[in-house]
Image (tube, grey):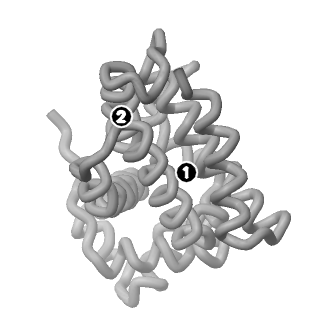
Amino acid sequence: MVREAKVSHDVLAAAKRLAERQELGGASMADIAKEAGITRVTLYRRGETRAAILVALRDELAREERERLLPVLTAAGDARTRLTATFEVLCALTDERADLLTGLDDPTLNAIYHDPGDESLTRAEFTAPIVRLLRDGALDGSLRELADPEETATVLYVQICETYRHLRREHRWSAKRATDAVLDLTLHGLLP
């Protein structure tokens, strides 16, 4: 079994800074090393590869989401109420990550968020909370039953995050207006 090298904090932070400046896509490993304040030889000696950096970035983004969503998932209330709160958290996280996400090219975003292969789903580490709430909602009657909760979770994750990000950056809507608009249309499609 091949394991990815652990990526140091300085290298991951450097990759994020490059992404925020929209330079990561074309950056060489030497560019990443320079941004991290180390030599390219040090980077290679540590075994910190581009693939390992993307895995580390994915792990960090997923961990941040888990930490922010845990209180929502364990809160009182029906699944629809908790799903609404989940979507609000995803909008807030998208806002906080806007520069980073905008600076990542499509292949990088795909490596971070998508399962490999054609017709893939969003990785479970990002959609599992939504899947859980969709299933809970079908059981408690607050959401309609869905034939494929995993596929629906991918659609919802992309719909919430991408639409919200577009409205905020390209249309320059306020966070409240973008959140309200995205949640209103999204949730109406899930009602029983």
User: Which one is in front, 128 or 51?
Assistant: 128
Front: mark 2 or 1: 2
Q: Residue at x 31, y 54 (%)?
A: 72
Q: Where is residue 185, by image quadrant?
A: top right
Classify 21 as above or below 90. below
Vertical order, 175 against 80 (above or below): below
Q: CA distance from mark 2 to mark 1?
A: 28 Å
Please report whichever mark, 2 or 1, sits nearer to the chain's N-terminal start.
1
Say which quadrant the N terminus sits in: top left
Instruction: Identify the residue at horizontal 31%, vertical 45% (top origin).
Output: 77
* Side (left or right) of 87 relative to 21: left
Residue 116 at x, y percent in the picture: 46, 29
Picture quadrant of residue 130 = top left
Instruction: Using a 10 Å C-alpha cutoff, classify the residue at mark 1 as few (fewer than 14 neighbours), some (14 to 19) or many (20 or more).
Output: some
Residue 56 position by quadrant: bottom left
Q: Which residue is mark 1?
A: 108
Amino acid found under the numbered disc labelled 1: Thr
